[in-house]
Amino acid sequence: MDDNGNVIITGFMGTGKTAVGRKVARLLGRPFVDMDAEIRKRAGKSIHDLFAEDGESTFRGMENALCEELCAQRELVIATGGGALVDPTNRERMMASGTVVCLCCDVDEIALRVSGNPHRPLLDVADPRAEIERLLAKRHAAYAAIPWQIEASGLSIEDVAARVIEITGIVTLPVHHPDGAYPVHIGNGLLSHIGGALRAGGAIEGTRIAVVSNPVVGSLYSTRVMDSLRSASLRPFPCSIPDGEQYKTLATVESLYEQFLDGRLDRTGVVLALGGGVTGDVAGFAAATYMRGVRLVQVPTTLLAMVDASVGGKTGVDLPTGKNLVGAFNQPQLVVIDPSVMATLPDAEMRCGLAEVIKHGVIGDSDLFAELEAGEAGLPSWWSQQGVNRIAQALRVKIDVVEEDPFEKGRRAVLNLGHTVGHGLERLSDFNMRHGEAVSIGMAVAARIAAELDWAEQSLVERIEAILTTWELPVHCPPLDAEAIWSAMTHDKKKCGDALRWVLPRTISEVETVEDIPPSLVKSVLRSLGAR
């Protein structure tokens, strides 16, 4: 959320909007507005009398005008009336002005909470419980269009308020592409809100969801994700692929096709990739090709996948001769990033993700690079609110690039900084070297080549190698033969004809793609960094 944006609490009558809103406002130190109370004040009469004397249309007109007025303000906590955001214009305005959270309760809980209250004009009927059911059914689609839902039945006001405040830390970044756009939601605790986010993104009740994961990630997070999907009236089923780059193959994709068929996934369904970059790439390619394409949702669980593979639509698998040689551009419908899951990642995997974050700083964000250069926060900060903001900062660099060049016809190649050497090293290691470690070495090589060509100052080389070292990332090659590394690089899919394409830094936040770097220079730099 924009730090100055409003916090809007909506939902059916009796779900606790006003009490929770007051508590949230106190905790955040913000003004509180209860829309129904404000309308009573302006009308000079109760809502019940307003309905009886002037009609519901008059009330709704006042409600619409107040929505427009409040959306022009900032840093408010707003409790809406139960029907205020059923109007799509009001809903869109409120969602544009800040974070909207919908409180939910079951029918029995609502009936108990509102029983005996004479100030509920919509329940001034012979059978209030039946009317609650009718109104809930009528408003179901409008409430479902709000991604952030909290089931408030049985929870205290304090508990619901704490969950609302957690949701207010969510950052949403739109990604535009030739066929439309999709949101990237970043926030701690989002695994529990995936169902609501899918429903808000267009998944209808009963949609089948293939949840693709590996045994390690699946054992940690699949239950939470599938419970959230079921609570949103979706129908998930688990699919499993082996863990590791060596399984990023067409054979693994074929196994997913069989699991999709067993789960009765059809073209109305969704493939949800829950895992790191390998899972996202394989599941994304399977989604692109199964029944000529089904919708895709990316839920990355590693920092590397969060800031790189999950956004931009590139999917694919490896062949024995090189990485990602078979693939497709398949834009996701939605990306959900929950940094809190990184608390279970080994430090080495976290650092691999940091290599890509540093890369984004070199490519296009000198402020991000400077923050990481200080090296003060440490790894745990990446699953705090600071981590949410840094992930968003890194992703903005990638989003700017992929929006300009969605199919890698030009500028998008800059995202491959460090990858020319990196992919060669991965291939020579039979993919036992971690991707982030290989890219880190590749960035050091690229910086030294730029300096040798007088494209960059030697100080740039020193800064890039120092920041990588600060975060315990490698800058020296393993003792492999330089000729073998060169040969492995020539299989890279980013070649342009027979020439290797290089991304070289000129300054922090300025890089350039070039071809025809002399092989002798490349091998000399590789040897200067430890190759034989």
Image: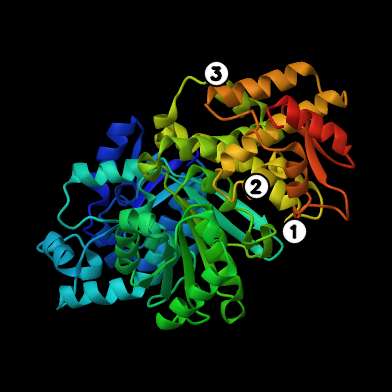
Check disc 1 and give the amino acid type.
Phe
Is 459 rendered above or below residue 381? above
Q: Which amino acid does label 2 sit on?
A: Leu
Q: Is residue 60 visible?
A: no
Q: Nearer the viewer, mark 2 or mark 1?
A: 2
Q: Residue at x 18, y 58 (%)?
A: 153
- Are circles 3 and 1 on residues that touch, CB within 8 Å? no
- Pointers 2 and 3 in contact (CB under 8 A)? no
Q: Position of residue 68 (x, y in %)?
A: 50, 51
In space, the residues marked 2 and 1 are separated at their CA atoms by 28 Å
Q: Position of residue 187 (x, y in %)?
A: 42, 44
Q: In which quarter of the image is the C terminus?
A: top right
Residue at 27% across, 41% down:
162
From this view, report whether residue 70 is shown above or below residue 218.
above
Ranked by sequence position, the earlier of labels 3 and 1 is 3
Residue linked to disc 3: 374
Query: Considering depth in this image, is 307 or 172 the residue closer to the camera?
Result: 307
Circle 1 residue: 407
Q: What residue is at 41 percent from the left and 60 percent from the top?
A: 214
- Give the total of numbered labels: 3
For the residues labelled 2 and 1, say whether their Cβ atoms are less than 8 Å apart: no
Q: Name the residue under label 2.
A: 428
Is disc 2 surrounded by few (<14), some (14 to 19) or many (20+) residues within 10 Å? Answer: some
In the image, 479: left or right of 525? left
In the image shown, does 446 or 426 lie closer to the viewer? 426
